[in-house]
Amino acid sequence: MDQAPSSGEELLRVLTALASPHRLRIIAALTEGRAYVSQLARRLRMNRPLLYMHLQRLEAAGLVVGTLETAPDGSSVKYFEVVPFALGLTPDVIRGAAQTLEPDGPEPDGSGKDRDT
Amino acid sequence: MDQAPSSGEELLRVLTALASPHRLRIIAALTEGRAYVSQLARRLRMNRPLLYMHLQRLEAAGLVVGTLETAPDGSSVKYFEVVPFALGLTPDVIRGAAQTLEPDGPEPDGSGKDRDT
DNA sequence: CCGGGGTGTCAGTCTCATCTGACAGGGGGT
DNA sequence: ACCCCCTGTCAGATGAGACTGACACCCCGG
């Protein structure tokens, strides 16, 4: 994965994806090796549809990938695994990404209203 | 700032703090230099109480610091500035932090219920 | 005394992510 | 036929966070 997630939108998607205890635990669990949805639901003791939603979120952020495989017995199983990412986060990185996001506009007027710094 | 935010709680606080377009823009704005609340509210065109809340969140996460100063004219002004942080985020880091967070417990039973990987 | 700029805090509203239970399938063994 | 395991999706309840307007308060300058 890119060190710099480029656009603010993308960065935001990754951050919101990670900002959840459940999703952190999911990623943690997947570092141990890939797993399919129902299996993971049992392991993490959480509702399957719920886990499903979280996995979708993580996949949309590009942090995990899921592949629907047809097992030898013919049934479908969806395996997920982590994408080895490395995200460096500093104020400047944020500053860069935020530009792709700012509906800022300069001071309304001012006329030397502000104090010194 | 630490490269590894240590506890899962702490990591989560930082992540949830960053997972907001407003707060990203706030940090971006503060990289340009410190500013006080009302001033920043004008610059970013947002409600002051709202900005106030976001700043509190960021401060709680240790990403910015605020100092209440008494200006030469005697009035109080609260300046905020970014804490130069550097956060490295990888699956393994998450795995480490998640341990301080897991109410996991192994499989309910199993008995070889799962498929091979 | 009044206006202007600042901080801090509050109750109330509203939007949105989360979470649950249930359903419709598909496929395989017994 | 029945049971078991899997995937995918949905309507609805719940809750947490975002957001607003208004207030109390401070200090100064005209």
Image (tube, coloured by chain):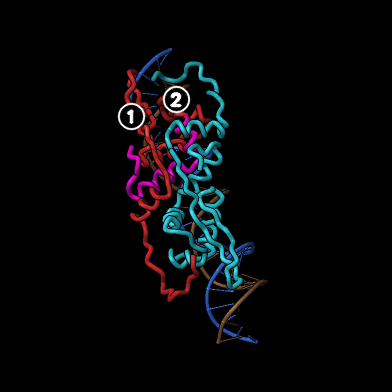
Chain colours: A red, B cyan, C blue, D brown
Could you tell which of marks 1 and 2 lies nearer the N-terminus?
A: 2
Which circle marks residue A32 in the picture?
A: 2
Mark 1 vs mark 2, CA separation in Å: 19 Å
- Three-letter amino acid code at disc 1? Leu
Residue B22: x and y in percent read 44, 56
Image mark 1: chain: A
Residue B22 appears in view: no
Residue at 56% of width from left, 26% of height from top? B105
Q: Nearer the viewer, residue B81 or A1?
A: B81
- Residue that numbered label 1 is attached to: A68
Picture coordinates of residue B18, whole percent (x, y): 46, 49
User: Depth check: B37 or A10 in front?
Assistant: B37
Describe the element under mark 2 as helix, strand or loop: loop
Q: Give the image location of residue A81, x and y in percent.
A: 38, 29
Residue occupying the point 47% across, 16% down: B112
In the picture, residue D7 is in which quadrant? top left
Tell me: residue A48, above or below residue B61. above
Task: Say what secondary structure mark 1 lies in.
Answer: strand
Front of the two marks 1 and 2: 2
Give the camera-side residue of B109 and B71: B71
Q: What residue range appears in magenta?
A: A1-28
Observer-nearest residue: A46 or B78?
B78
- Residue positioned 43% across, 63% down in the render: B44
Quick check: is B41 in the magenta stretch?
no
